[in-house]
Image: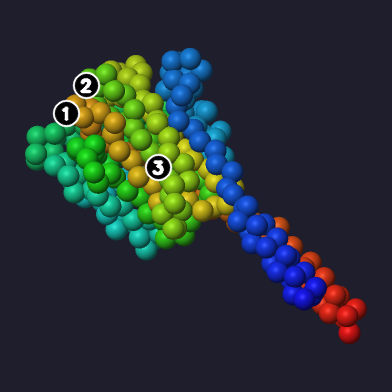
Amino acid sequence: MIKRNVIVCLTAVIILAAGSQASIIGVFDGGGIGTAYTDFSSLAAAHSNFMGTVQNSITFSEYDVGTVINNQYSTSKGVTFSNTGQQLASVMYEGYNATSGYILEPLDGYDGSYMPDMDKALVEYPNNGPSPFTITFANSVSTVGSFVGMGKEGTVDTLTITAFDTFNNVLAALIVKTAPWADDRNREGLWGISSSSADIAKITISNDSSDNYANALIFDTLQWSSQSSTPVPEPATIILLTVGGMIISLRSKRK
């Protein structure tokens, strides 16, 4: 009975240790717009610092205007975009007049200071319903972020961005602020999320505004990184090995 009780107690320690593992989440939500960040360049510099060394990116530049993006990057990048079939779902550049009559108005930073002049972006309209713009990674990542924009209409200037793990658990939900900056024809911002466990598997983005055109999502320059270091045994694994040795020792002493 003593041996069984010891084993049960030690097993409980293993479960507790395994259950106590948690990701350390970091976020960049543009909260310093208007104070710490007085122009788009200062925001972009802070965002770049948050993202660190980026391993992968998608800019949509290789696709023709008018292209609807969904699984084009699933093989080459391991990234799939979904909920992209709205009234307007298209790769566009500044001034491009879609056949539907929608025009992507000028964006700050798309003059070579952040992105090249006439660089393409993905535009979704509307993006405030029950099916938000969704990014899914075939392999979970440690850091992810992008450029986002929305229309100037109304007073709501935020988007809700949520990160999920492979089990669809919410890792982080942040309200990302945007601003009109130098050109007030759109509101623009940058966001980022990092996880110490590299367990970010899906991102959803939804406009918080229901006003027409303000509920349009402008999305570009998706960047992400994955942990690439040699795996180190987690504390729970180390405890398991230690407990195993203790059980063997107890058995030997009883014999």
Tag shown at residue 195: none
Q: Secondary structure at mark 2?
A: loop
* Res 144 seen here: no
Q: Who comes first in sequence, dot 1 or dot 2?
A: 2
Q: Nearer the viewer, residue 18 or 223?
A: 18
Mark 2 or mark 3, whichever is nearer to me: 3
- Label located before the other in sequence (2 or 3): 2
Residue 228 in the image: state x and y as whole percent: 60, 56
Q: Residue at x 17, y 44 (%)?
A: 86
Q: Return the mark for residue 212.
A: 1
Q: How many marks?
A: 3
- Of residues 74 and 113, the one nearer the viewer is 74
CA separation, marks 3 and 1? 23 Å
Q: Which corner quadrant of the image does residue 189 belong to? A: top left
Above or below, 3 against 225 in this view is below
| Residue identifier under label 3 | 162
Tell me which residue sits at (21%, 29%) in the image: 210
Direction left: furthest residue:
100
Is label 1 in contact with label 2 (beta carbons under 8 Å)? yes
Q: Which residue is mark 2?
A: 153
